[in-house]
């Protein structure tokens, strides 16, 4: 498992974006579409840069386990991208971004849970099953919190716990 840095940066940057969005909800930052778009597109741009740098030189085909692991996480990333496009299109259709934006956190955590479950099975590292189960438990909690600004805080915490920290552990293990 060599993409721990990508997961670390995803967790860190999107947790930061979630906290910034919470600042918008509290009127600490202007409640404008441009501010919110800057927060999320900015995090996405920084993540893209971090992912490219992190994955540089790691594109060679590995063993079957490595290929399966990378394929699972690629699918998670593609799924999240399709989710974001779908949320955008759905919000335009119903003319209400807030009504559909709250589904992002539960669905992203469900995707992460799937990625960690596959990773645990492939690597036979039991602690990753716990990360996966944490994601699966956090997803419905996020759904229950929909419509409340505290969902943003809970989502930031979940991203740190279930992406940044495990990503950091994997990144460190890969260096040893």
Image (cartoon, grey):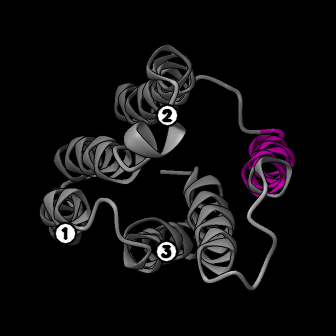
**Of 84 and 128, the residue lying toward us:** 84
Q: Which residues are magenta?
A: 37-57
| Element marked by disc 1 | helix
Which residue is rendered at x = 43% and y = 25% of the image?
79
**Of 99 and 18, the residue lying toward us:** 99
Mark toward the start of the polypeptide (1 vs 3): 1
The residue that mark 2 highlights is 96
The reply to whether callout 1 and callout 2 are in contact (CB within 8 Å) is: no
Mark toward the start of the polypeptide (2 vs 3): 2
**Of 61 and 92, the residue lying toward us:** 92
7 in relation to 37, above or below: below
Between marks 2 and 3 in the image, the one whose residue lies nearer the viewer: 2
Q: Position of residue 32 (x, y in %)?
A: 79, 56
The residue that mark 3 highlights is 156
| Element marked by disc 3 | helix
Between marks 1 and 3 in the image, the one whose residue lies nearer the viewer: 3
Q: Position of residue 118 (x, y in %)?
A: 23, 41
Label 2 – label 3 distance at C-alpha: 23 Å
Name the quarter where the C terminus is drawn: bottom right
Residue 134 got which mark? Answer: 1
| Element marked by disc 2 | loop
51 in relation to 137, above or below: above
Q: Give the main secondary structure, helix, strand or loop, of the magenta stretch.
A: helix
User: Is 105 on the left or on the right of 24, as rendered?
Assistant: left
User: Is 153 on the left or on the right of 68, as rendered?
Assistant: right
């Amino acid at each position: 498992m060599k993409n721990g840095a990508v997961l670390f940066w995803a967790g860190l940057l999107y947790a930061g974006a979630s906290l910034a969005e919470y600042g918008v909800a509290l009127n600490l930052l202007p409640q404008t579409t441009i501010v919110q778009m800057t927060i999320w597109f900015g995090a996405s741009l920084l993540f893209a840069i971090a992912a490219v740098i992190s994955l540089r030189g790691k594109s060679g085909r590995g063993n079957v386990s490595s290929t399966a692991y990378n394929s699972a996480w690629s699918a998670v990333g593609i799924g999240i991208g399709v989710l974001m496009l779908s949320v955008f299109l759905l919000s335009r259709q119903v003319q209400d971004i807030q009504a559909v934006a709250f589904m992002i956190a539960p669905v992203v955590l469900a995707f992460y849970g799937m990625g960690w479950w596959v990773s645990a099975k492939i690597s036979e590292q039991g602690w990753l099953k716990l990360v996966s189960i944490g994601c699966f438990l956090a997803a419905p909690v996020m759904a229950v919190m929909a419509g409340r600004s505290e969902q943003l805080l809970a989502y930031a915490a979940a991203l740190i716990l279930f992406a940044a920290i495990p990503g950091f552990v994997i990144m460190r293990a890969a260096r040893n």
